[in-house]
Image (cartoon, rainbow, N blue to C red):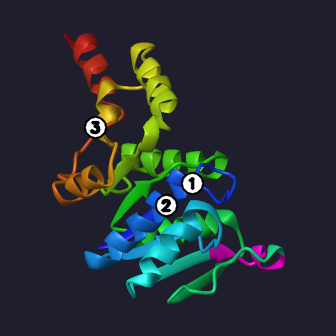
Amino acid sequence: MDICVFGSSSEQIDRIYLDSAVHLGKSLAKKGHGVIYGAGKYGIMGAVARGAASENGKLVGVTPRFFDELEVISDICTELIYTETMRERKAIMEDRADAFIICAGGMGTFEEFFEVLTLKQLNRHSKAIIVYNLNGYYDPMIAMMENAVQEKFMSGDCSRLFSVARSEDEVFEQLESYVPFSYNKYDFLDWSKEEQNG
């Protein structure tokens, strides 16, 4: 499979996140998976890429051209795709990926996660989305989503659209045992019609 990995571009984060990302990249390549990522050479993005490259893995980087000016694009990609916009970048990554792993990250990673999650909610894809919750980094976000369910802004079924892994072993267990889940965001409309007609 070609696995899209989202994650931080920061080098200021705790070393445990960077080291685990290198190991994840190595493991993906050893298992024969290609890596699709944002083509950055820093942070978790760069660490995953270095790990995959060290095992001669397929490494597809996708980046807007304006990042060239910032000199943050990795030179170890086996395929480098330039786009004109961030929106186009995400679309290519989403289309080419067979599954998504969400590593620790900031604003960009949050956006990427919620975009692929929203698209899955709307039945635009049925690919695995695995939140790699190392060190409990995503605990507050998961709690926020649970609160949204309790307040009825989200259906409880939304929690079945992604899985949470606390270790690399769990990431691969969930990836290998994944069964697509079909979800209709607008089921409540059918219920409302039945109540009106009943």
The answer to whether the residue labelled 1 contacts the one labelled 2, judged by CB atoms less than 8 Å apart, is yes
Residue visible at 60% across and 69% down?
Answer: 89
In the rendered image, which residue does mark 3 sit on? 160
Report the residue that reaches farthest toward the front.
Answer: 15
Residue visible at 23% across and 52% down?
Answer: 174
Q: CA distance from mark 1 to mark 3?
A: 31 Å
The answer to which of 122 and 74 lies nearer the viewer is 74
Residue type at mark 2 is: Asp
Q: Is residue 34 left or right of residue 172?
A: right
Residue type at mark 1 is: Arg
Residue 19's disc is: 2
Disc 3: CA contacts within 10 A as few (<14), some (14-19) or many (>=20): some
**Residue 23 in picture, x, y percent from top left:** 40, 66
Residue visible at 36% across and 51% down?
Answer: 129
Disc 1: CA contacts within 10 A as few (<14), some (14-19) or many (>=20): few
**Residue 21 in picture, x, y percent from top left:** 47, 61
Q: CA distance from mark 3 to mark 2?
A: 29 Å
Q: CA distance from mark 1 to mark 2?
A: 6 Å
Residue 15's disc is: 1
Residue type at mark 3 is: Arg
Range covered by the magenta-colored residues: 63-69
Residue 153 visible in rendering: no
For marks 1 and 3, the one nearer the N-term is 1
Q: Quadrant of the C terminus?
A: top left
Residue 66 magenta-drawn? Answer: yes
> Can you tell which quarter of the image residue 125 is in?
bottom left
